[in-house]
Amino acid sequence: MKSVILLGLATMALLFGCVNMTNNQQQYLCPDGSTIVSDLASCPKVDLDLKECQDASSSSDYYGDSDRDICYYDLALNRNNITYCKMIHNSDSYSDYTAARCGVELALYNDDMALCNNLSVLSRYDCFSHLSTELDDPSICQNIKSIPKMDDCLYDYVYYNAYYISDWSVCGMFSGKGDESEYCYYEAASDTGDLSYCDKLTGYDYYYSKASCYGAVAKNKNSPSICNQLGTTEEKDDCYYDYATGYPYVVDVCNNISEEYRKANCIDWTNYSYY
């Protein structure tokens, strides 16, 4: 047995080589590439799989992936350890090998959404955002401590699930008035035909005004008379305009617009637009 051990040490010496002689004592470079010892048996243990990742190329391919990031990603999943997810540098949203996507895989595998909290701030947000969409659960976004980022997460959920949402109470989860919540109420009204969602719009965002919301609902219901329910002439004109110029175009509805210049513009658009 002793001869086997001596042979093993001799083999290691050949592999890693001697460094120099100090006081007539041979010194060796350990497999980690940095530690120098006089006895190879005292070398620190080397995680060969991790070292393989560290030595892999960091150059990105056409999809933004690098061999190093892919290696860390696979190592995290194989060992079920999110620590290796944090070693991934890629943040390209089009890549399948980001720290956030790595965190999502482990969170789903362990049924533990809190694992996302172990990632960096940006990857943490992306991790919760991906999970809320994939699990069809917007409440997951509320795990994000940053209010603006929580709203961004809820917006992503609505944007990617707008055609499948059955419970529009998600609009009430936003922190306050802003582009994100306005978009949510607009989509809720368009989807359900419920004008009460339009009435929640404040005009904070020009594209999601109360008038345009009524116009969208009217268009979906093929009922331009819904525009008459708005309070001001300007709002009614905006509603009729959006109805008429929304595909498929309905030039006759332009005649309901009171302001002459706007009416003429509506007629021109519906007659000559190529979009």
Image (cartoon, rainbow, N blue to C red):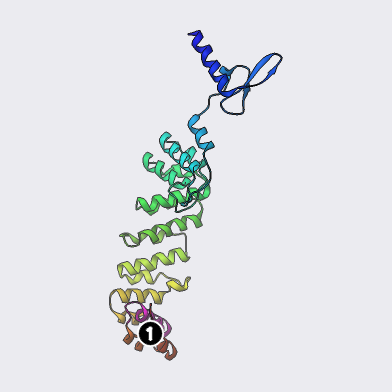
263 relative position to 60: left or right:
left
The main secondary structure of the magenta stretch is helix
Residue at the top extreme of this rendering: 2
14 and 144: which is toward the camera: 14
Q: Is residue 210 above or below residue 72?
A: below
Residue located 53% across and 12% down the image: 6
Which range of residues does the magenta coloring cover?
A: 231-249
Residue 198: percent from left, percent from top = 38, 71
Residue located 45% across and 44% down the image: 116
Residue at the left extreme of this rendering: 222
Say what amino acid the circle numbered 1 marks.
Answer: Tyr
How many numbered dots are placed on residues in this image?
A: 1
Q: Is residue 234 magenta?
A: yes
Residue located 64% across and 19% down the image: 27
Residue 197: percent from left, percent from top = 36, 68
Q: Is residue 41 above or below residue 57?
A: above
Q: Which residue is mark 1?
A: 272
221 and 93: which is toward the camera: 93
Quadrant where the image shows the C terminus: bottom left
The image quadrant that residue 189 belongs to is bottom left
Residue 54: percent from left, percent from top = 53, 37
Residue at the front extreme of this rendering: 14
175 relative position to 252: left or right:
right
217 relative position to 69: left or right:
left
Q: Is residue 138 above or below residue 183?
A: above
Residue 24: percent from left, percent from top = 69, 13
Residue at the bottom extreme of this rendering: 260
143 and 266: which is toward the camera: 266
User: Does residue 106 show up?
Assistant: yes
Residue located 44% across and 72% down the image: 207
